Image (cartoon, helix red, strand yellow):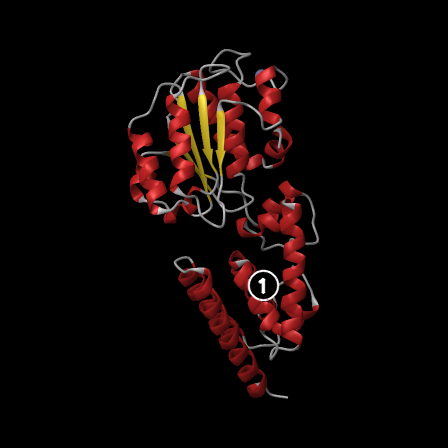
Amino acid sequence: MGDNTLSQKNWLAPITEQLTQLLAQQKLPHGILFNGHPGSGTWDLGYWLARQLLCPENGLWGPACGHCKACTLILAGNHPDIVHIEAEKAHIGVESIRKANQFLVKKAQLGQSKVVIIQQAELMTEAAANALLKTLEEPTPFSFLLLTSYDSDRLLPTIQSRCTRFDIRPPVGSALKQSLGDSPLIDDYANMSHLTQLQDKEQGQLFTTFETVFNAWLMQPQQTEELVAFLTEHSFALGWLMQQFTAATRKAYQWQGIREHEGLAKLSQSRPDTLIQAITLITHASRQLKQLTQANKKFVIESLVIDLLKLISNNAEKRPR
Ligand SMILES: [Zn+2]
């Protein structure tokens, strides 16, 4: 991931400018948190900053050159002075954080700075978060902890309070459409939560699968299995489910500029108040899911899909012919 992604996400520019200034003034904090929706650029920023910190070409605090040995090693994922931590099996365990802590007390091998970048830090277990806390409280010189999160509410308040926080807020609606270029997956009401399916190829494919599964369910709502399985495996897709119901509500109120597909046309035949009830149910389930294990997730999603089914079919019976 290079500066291309960064310039594409033009809403990141004010943050990179601010960070460049902090670097130039040698005032960069030791713990930094980048928070924003998936696709908004949390990782792009973390990775960008790591490169600024590790490239020696323009002085310790100057911009990364992009072609020296250090830059090449980072791009190849082989730089010895950066550790990248991400979730394994949906969690970041205490062992990963301990290793990072050990790495930070050692001397840097190539330059002076050492960087630990924690992707989706909200997935740290409590033990992991506590282990990290010590390092945040007692920083070693020239060591930097860059945390990224999609949902900072799930981070321990003590972690949050020890990091300097940058919230990423991409534009919405037509402004977002403009900065990303036209896409069949985007309508006039697009917002941050639509970004992943637009910018990440894998997510884009997953989104297409979701639409297919969701459409199939709307055509035969009694057959809930496939939708339940999909949502259980990818619980973030509840956000997509919400988008669909929101779009159907807008369509039911005859707003213009909504992306069309078969299922949506059917769904928007429902009464708007029914659709709003559906959105409330999804929001509620989505909150519940954040605190549950996989086994319990399936139960919540099953109940949700059945409740949605009841709502939609009751509505169909009552609709005047
Ligand atoms: Zn360089």
Which residue carries the number 1 mark? 230
Residue 158, position in %: x, y?
29, 40
Indicate whether 120 appears above or below 46.
below
Tag 1: amino acid: Phe
Q: Residue at x 61, y 67 (%)?
A: 251
Where is ligand 1, by quadrant?
top right
Q: Nearer the viewer, residue 295 or 74?
A: 295
Quadrant of the image occupied by residue 57: top right
| Element carrying mark 1 | helix
Q: Nearer the viewer, residue 3 or 134?
A: 134
Q: Quadrant of the C terminus?
A: bottom right
Q: Residue at x 52, y 56 (%)?
A: 236
**Left or right: 177 as drawn, with respect to 107:** right
Q: Residue at x 63, y 73 (%)?
A: 217
Q: Residue at x 34, y 22 (%)?
A: 140
**Left or right: 147 as drawn, with respect to 255:** left
**Left or right: 81 as drawn, with respect to 95:** right
Q: Nearer the viewer, residue 66 or 99?
A: 99
Indicate whether 167 appears above or below 316.
above
Q: Is residue 295 visible?
A: yes
Q: Quadrant of the N terminus?
A: top right
Residue 38, position in %: x, y?
53, 46
Indicate whether 107 appears above or below 226.
above
